[in-house]
Amino acid sequence: MRQYHKEVIYGLYNDEEILIRAVRNARGKHLEIMDVYTPFPVHGLDHAMGLEESRLHQAGFVYGMLGTLTAFLGMTWIFTRDWPIIFGGKPHWPVPSFIPITFELTVLFAAWGMTITFYTICGLWPGVSNPQLDLRTTDDKFCIAFDRSEVSDSDARAFFSETGAEEVNTKSI
Amino acid sequence: MSVVVSPVRRPLVEGHKTYHQITEDLCAPTERAPSKSWIIAFIISVATLAYGVFCILWTIWMGTGTWNLNRTIGWGYDITNFVWWIGIGHAGTLISAILMLFRQRWRTGVNRAAEAMTIFAVICAALFPMIHVGRIWVVYYFFPYPNTRGPLWPNFNSPLLWDVFAISTYFSVSLLFWYTGLVPDFATIRNRATGFRKKVYNFLSFGWTGSAKHWQRWESLSLVLAGLSTPLVLSVHTIVSFDFATSVIPGWHTTIFPPYFVAGAIFSGFAMVQTLMVITRKILQLEEYITIEHIESMNKVILVTGTIVGVAYLTELFIAWYSGYVYEQFAFFNRAMGVYWWSYFGMMACNVISPQIFWVKKFRRSVFVTFFMSIFVNIGMWFERFVIIATTLARDYLPSSWSYYIPTWVEIGIFIGTIGLFFTFYMIFTRVAPVVAIAEVKHILKAGGDQYIGENAVHHHHDEHHHSETSHH
Amino acid sequence: MKLQDQSVWVDEKDLTQDPIFIEQAQAEVHPMSLESVLEDERSSQVESNRRDFLKLLGFGLGAATLASCEVPIKRAIPYTVRPDEIVPGIANYYASTFISGGDVLPVLVKTREGRPIKIEGNSKASWTGGGTSARAQASVLSLYDYNRVQEPATVSGDKIEKLSWADLDKSLMDSFATGAKVRILSHTIVSPTTKKAIAEFTAKYTNTKHICYDPVSSAALLDAAQKCFGERVIPDYKFDQAELIVSFNADFLGTWISPVEYAAQYAKNRTVHAENPKMSRHVQVESHMSLTGSNADNRILVKPSEQSAAIAHLATALGISSVPSLSLNDKAKSALSKLADQLKASAGKSLVVCGNNNLGDQILCFNINQALGNIGKTVSTARASFQRQGSDSDLIGLVKEMQSNQVDVLIVWHANPCFDTPLAKDFSTAMTSVKTRVSFNALMDETASMCTHLAPDHHYLESWSDAEAKRGLYSLVQPTINPLFNTRQAPHSLLVWSASPNINGDSEQAYYDYLRANWTQNILPKAAGASWDLCLHDGVCELPASGTAASFNPSLTEAAAALSKPAGTELELSFTESVGIGAGQYSNNPWLMELADPINRTVWGNYLAVPIKFDGDRRFIAFAEVNENGEMVDLTLAGVKTTIGAVKQFGQMEGTVSIPLGYGRTKAGVCGSDIGTDFFPSLKIENGYVQYYLTDVQVSNSSGKIEKNFACVQHHHTLGVTAVETSTGKTINADEAALVDDAFKPLTKGYQGSLTKRSVLRQTNLKDIKESLEHLQEERKEFQKLNSYTLYPGHEYKYNSGHHWGMHIDLNACIGCGSCAVACMAENNVPVVGKREVSRHHEMTWLRIDRYFYGDVEKPNVVYQPMMCQHCNNAPCENVCPVNATNHSSEGLNQMAYNRCVGTRYCANNCPYKVRRFNWYDFTAADLFPINQHNLNKETDKPYYAENLIRMVLNPDVTVRSRGVIEKCSFCIQRIQEGKLNAKKAERSLNDSDVKTACQTACPTGAITFGDMNNKEGVLTKKLENPLNYIVLEEVNVQSVVNYTMKVNNRDENLYA
């Protein structure tokens, strides 16, 4: 969420399917949607809104590779360079023995890296209070919001009544 | 909705729920005052936990000699319990991750509680490798950190070290997965709460708003975490099995262990989920969310994994005979007919024979049978680990060193204590977080709600499906 | 730290009892304590008292924590003026002689910074060859026994009054006044100088008599020698010159007369060479399984009361006339007849010995040897042994004298007649009639506690003395430490009391002067080229044998009269002597208490051995229905009932049971008291000789209850004992059948082959040696082929350069005596753990001697397998240690870094040989928390190892392990390092004989060889060339570096046919 002051007009819908139709409608009318709030992930909404594909998983791959390299190179350095010690007749570079830890660190780095990235780019952290338009959007209401500086109130209201919004409100956030 | 609805599928959410009704139902347990039965159960759990803590302190203070392990049997109750708890801790991530990847919609009813169970079980499990050591105050030697001793690093050849990495990774990734799922639900509770509770849930929900972009990323994260967790969950028990499989002890040194352990882990994990769900749905009145359908699905998993485990037991016996290797042959002969025969038969009866009743649909759908079977399976799986660990060690290569082992009150106390720990955590969890994932149930309502599918479906929604988008996946 | 009540000092201020120092040492946290701050008046004047209190409390806790991290020893004081011989960190060895009654052994004493810490054999002594016994090895611990009597004192009732030596001397010399009847009672005394002192005392107080007895008597043997050879000595037996050894109940490898000497001789003809397989045959005639019997090729079972009959039968079969015929069981009869033929064939190269305390038996045995032409060859008197001198009749006479109030003064000299004689009860009662009772004893034992005067003797490691164990074979005892307590050497006391002109009261070392004078006068002149210094340096002075060919007097009429008649009772019991604690003399030595009995592997207690047989189906059934070892039975001996734990004993003759003596001490000290049951009161005296068997015996059925903390270190006993299955008539492996749990009744034979197919133990008969060798080599080839399929190349390149340490153990030489096990404990600071912990299998031994039975259940053979860390090149323990605490050295050693060990026990689990030991508690009191410290046997105030005095025995070169870490055999790495340093200092390469492990040097038979496998000229390499060698569990591919030689027995099945 952006943290600067905004005047918002929003409409609440009862059903995700009506919501998706409304979003398509808005896109057809070139009304710029500020944001949509739903109580659960609605499949297809991002496409309807024209949101870009998330690149989070690509970041995850990079983190994972970082973990792989850290583990494998780290263990290799320790066993062959830093202090080569003989264990049970195994060579100093026992590659099969390195597989489990390499795998685990790959997963660990990827999972933590992605999760931290996710919360960071979404601006979600313990104690953060992001402004909310309507408390019911985490219950059973689906909300489309327009920035009043971008979309005029009349356009918005016309749009909401056309697409079957249950309620239309304005709010300053 | 953008999902394909199977007409033969039975509804997963019953009672003509609306989205709001779901919110009401699932938030209610966190909002109302605890019931009398909850309080009593909680006191019992905490009391057992306290006893367990006492026994752990006793062990640390007095020495590992307070356990009956000996020069031959170096691991007994401690590692048996460790593997048992780790196994139990497999169902949660399995349900969340693998079933998510396989698009098994029924997982939504149980995944939250199962994931919580995973985390608590892993905590219980991780306790044992820590307290079973002789010098707990230097347990940090396990971790590779630059030091002034040479520097001296841990031994990356040791399966026990792999365990440390596997379990800590598993625990933390499961925690991330679970908590990320919880964030939107905490936001739901926050938006219903007032005063101090609102503050607490605001903190817990990280400022979640339900923005479309967040949901998109959230889904992407969930999917990748599921993708990562799937091999992770398989790796964890595989690595635990390496503790034994990479050794030279007959009965431990077995290539079948990784798949066998994983199947066993899923088996026992699902049994524990059943135990908890049967109680939870009853006490929290969630029968409409955790339905007989869920129970039946899980019973099918139990039947399959139980049978896999059974095949593994028989394979072991066959291979022992077929190998012609006297130590291996004797190890298995001894398991079945030696002094610990009762644990082998407990294992066979509980794990292989009794789950076969789930071939009968009536039993699969019986809450009563399910509950008792889940307890059986947990006992059987405990026996399995005891057989593998203690029985095997008791009689290995040199007959001069053969021994016998029965636990002391301290060892039993610690085991009971971990059960107390587990239930204490679980009971707090049922009071703090929605036991069923709210957002995810809403998400599948149209695909699994009884007003949409099945015999009770209300057909005026049907035409809307025609207009709905087809899945882009 | 309580310091002042101990004789150990940590600081010179402690030594001088500096009061300030003691006060400081006692204060845990000083000088700022919480109370002192709170009591400060100012604290009540300031306002915020509560917060200050918390601050102070915080400080107090912190200070206490800090204080607890530091042992309150202030500073160490280095030697400023260093004694000439002492270099800190370098061990000094002094030649000395271990003497305990008749147990005599020339030894070297290893001292570090003035503390004796280890006993080694003295290889200069020709008759022992440098071997040691477990008892000699453990004797160093007795030096530091805090139960020792520490000062001269007078005792009246419970009141002990300390006094000075001068006062004691004065009060005693009054009692010796002319005419007083003085009796000196001792065990065997082998010291010529001591005997001289006694003679001086006797000359001064003419009414004195020295009486000598042995706790386990050889009086009949001595008397028989008197009759046959005209001299009351133990003849010299030469086991190395005998092809056929027949022993009637003589445990000559374990407890009889001079086991170390005999074992060394015996082993010479027992090691086998594959090319020229030849070895002696050993037949043991006995009822119970003795250590010697367990090493025998054949055992002929006769009941204890049939011993005379058996000897008589053999004598008759050998053509000795006028020997009465006594009834004997048929099996034994037939076997002995066949044995007679074999003996005839080996005439002059055979040896018959007898351990019975029966004059007739002994005379007959001498006659048998005479008939076989062995006298002068394998039996001679030229080097007669003085290691037993006791007389049963003298002891009986003394009791009678005391009972009739004819004794005025009794001096007890390391003898404990109130415990270790069958007359113990009479003796204690009669003793009260003696007015003055003086004790030289080291402990306040059963007898010393009844004495009026305590004149404690030095420990032998504090003494100057000498010994003549065998005629002309002298050795010296020299002190290796200043007396720890205010004690005085016993012969010195005698000389003082007799106001001898030969003892110089003003001399600093009066008794040394006396000893040296005696040697200069009487001994050194006989030895050509010997000087005092040389003798002292070597520890021994060996005179050439004087050839006095004694005439042989058959004395057969006396023999016939003395033979015992077979009792014909259903059950007979034999009393045995424990290899470790003897007849109770060594009870307070925990190393010996925890030395496992070689046969039944029990520790800390004595158990009734009951015979065992196969029920023809799938169970071993023991007489008296004992199912589990340790179950309690009622034992009724001549009407006296005792409840005792029983063990099922392979090789125990049917109709007989046996029990070790020496346990059940009531006043032995913290470790020896109240362990086991005393059976001395049950012994009978016949014809003036103590008899070590009983015929009036009843044993009840087992009560089913197991003795509390029944401690046995080996629960499974066999690697395949066979028996006939009744249903099929086939011979099956009975032990494997017995492994099936009772829940599987219909399964009878178990899994046949589960034990016998293991590559743990390899044994064969001498005549099958070629076949077995082929089989062995074929099998090893197969193993090695399989082992060559490997993922990893290994580190041979590293091991092949420099040293690669290895070991060889000859199973044919190992007799199972346990001296290596005790030596290992002494060398490596291995703690003993006490009865309860052993019962929980928490024993810490780095080296154990596994004992397996094989062969037929009725007449099994035994093999001993010393088992320690095998230092595997592919060590499974190393791979699994998560923290790198165990790994491999480039010299092939499997190393333990105790400090790094976290204690997961994973390595111990993954050890195929189960040689790793875990410190379950703080057994050695190495930590600061007293709660973890461990009591061995009910010590309540201070655990055994927490005593500073006991800790003086610790080897400073070996880490004392704390609780929670794993330990194991290190191949005595401290000795390897020492050897390397010595070689380096001498600027030469290390020879493998430079390094000898503690077990190796302790072994009387040379069964263990340690060395460098890369040293192609070394001793080890030669041993490794033996084609009979094998590696235990070779197919597991752990690449152990310990080689064992296949056990070969020379059993003759025809003897049983």
Image (cartoon, grey):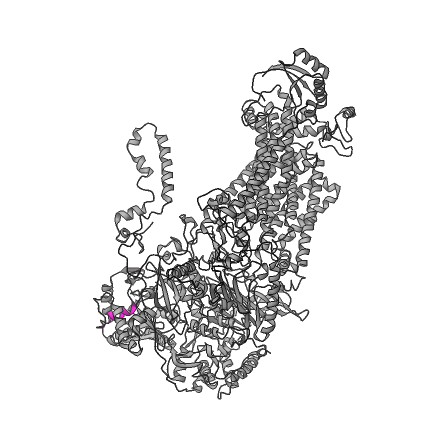
Residue sticking out furthest to the bottom: C321
* Residue B304: in magenta span: no
From the viewer's perspective, tell me whether residue C369 is left or right of residue B284: left
Rendered position, B418 above or below B112? below
Span colored in magenta = C478-505
Rendered position, C665 above or below C327? above
Quadrant in which residue C654 is drawn:
bottom right
Quadrant in which residue A130 is drawn:
top right
Residue C433 visible:
no
From the viewer's perspective, tell me whether residue C665 is left or right of residue C293: left
Rendered position, C252 above or below A88? below
C1009 vs C281, nearest the viewer: C1009
Residue at horizontal 37%, vertical 82%? Answer: C231
From the viewer's perspective, tell me whether residue C1040 is left or right of residue A159: left
Magenta stretch mostly in which secondary structure?
A: loop
Residue sticking out furthest to the top: A154
In which quadrant is the C terminus of chain A drawn?
A: top right
Query: Where's residue C549, x and y in %?
Result: 39, 85
Query: Where's residue C568, x and y in %?
Result: 53, 77
Residue A116 visible:
yes
* Residue C488: in magenta span: yes
Residue at horizontal 61%, vertical 38%? Answer: B117
Query: Where's residue C250, x and y in %?
Result: 46, 75
A112 vs B67, nearest the viewer: A112
